[in-house]
Amino acid sequence: MATLLRRALRHSTAAALKRKAACVLHSRQSKLKEEMIDHDTEDWEKAEGFRGLERVGGVDLSFIKGDEVNACAALVVLSYPDLEVVYEELQMVCLNAPYIPGFLAFRETPFLVEAVQRLQQKEPSLVPQVILVDGNGSLHQREFGVACHLGVLTDLPCVGVAKNLLWVDGLEEKILLKEKLKDLQEAGGTYPLTGSSGKVLGMALKSCERSTKPVYVSAGHRVSLETAVRLTHSCCNFRVPEPIRQADIRSREYIRKKSNGS
């Protein structure tokens, strides 16, 4: 009985600490959100064919299988429109901060910000003009996901591209929405993801002809949703846009080599 009581006490204490941390993070998130810009700010964003855009970044964190703490943080930069990798940085990181729903960015973004800062110092000519983020932007419980967070902290345009739909409050009933997404037949087809307020939080995008599932695009920082969708589609040879796809492939390969001792 005493053991059960001690366990219950530890559990209740941990839950209380998590609630307190969530309150602190909510306040910090709200302040960062005040700096978010949700419209196009760059000339290339408004130009036909994104004329003037030469470098697109992609970021991703890949975890060691069965390990929620150790991961590989990847930043790649691709030429545009050729989508050839011109820069990569892969680094093992340790995510000591606990995961709290709605505040994932506080756990993952610091490592991505540091990667961008290192590139700015080492090779400023290769700094991306926009970053595609494996995650959400405004398609988030408080309309401030990891793509918004990274964009505000780096002051770079960022786009959120998620492989799985985050079911935030206000989206259509799940079964109904899934049926509508099945109607996306042609590459470039979209369906708006609208919240209860009537605001479009993101877009489901059929990114290429071969894809049987959409990706979920949302604006992060210094980019409109329309531009985010067009840019994402233009970067897709496969379902996942090439900058994120390359970040994912290279980070997983890096983990594999590290695990094999090479």
Image: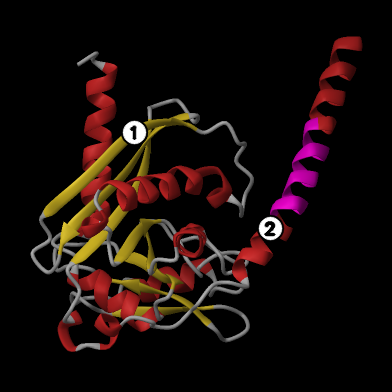
- Residue 77: x %, y % from top left: 22, 54
For label 2, the residue is: 28
Location of residue 160 (image quadrant): bottom left
Colouring scheme applied when the structure was drawn: secondary structure
Mark carried by residue 91: 1
| Distance of label 2 from label 1 (alpha carbons) | 27 Å
Placement of 126 over or under 46, stated as above or below = above
Q: Which residues are magenta?
A: 14-25
- Residue 50: x %, y % from top left: 20, 80
Indicate left or right for 170 with 2 as reference: left
- Residue 111: x %, y % from top left: 45, 42
Image quarter (top left, top right, bottom left or bottom right) of the N terminus: top right
**Residue at 19 percent of width and 48 percent of height:** 87
**Residue at 38 percent of width and 28 percent of height:** 64
Ranked by sequence position, the earlier of labels 2 and 1 is 2
Indicate left or right for 242 with 182 as reference: left
- Mark 1, residues whose alpha carbon is within 10 Å: few (<14), some, or many (≥20)? some
Indicate left or right for 71 with 214 as reference: right
Name the secondary structure under disc 2: helix
**Residue at 28 percent of width and 82 percent of height:** 45
Name the secondary structure under disc 1: strand
Report whether residue 72 is seen: yes
Q: What kind of residue is marked 2?
A: Arg
Q: What kind of residue is marked 1?
A: Gln
Image quarter (top left, top right, bottom left or bottom right) of the C terminus: top left
- Mark 2, residues whose alpha carbon is within 10 Å: few (<14), some, or many (≥20)? few
Prevailing SS of the magenta stretch: helix
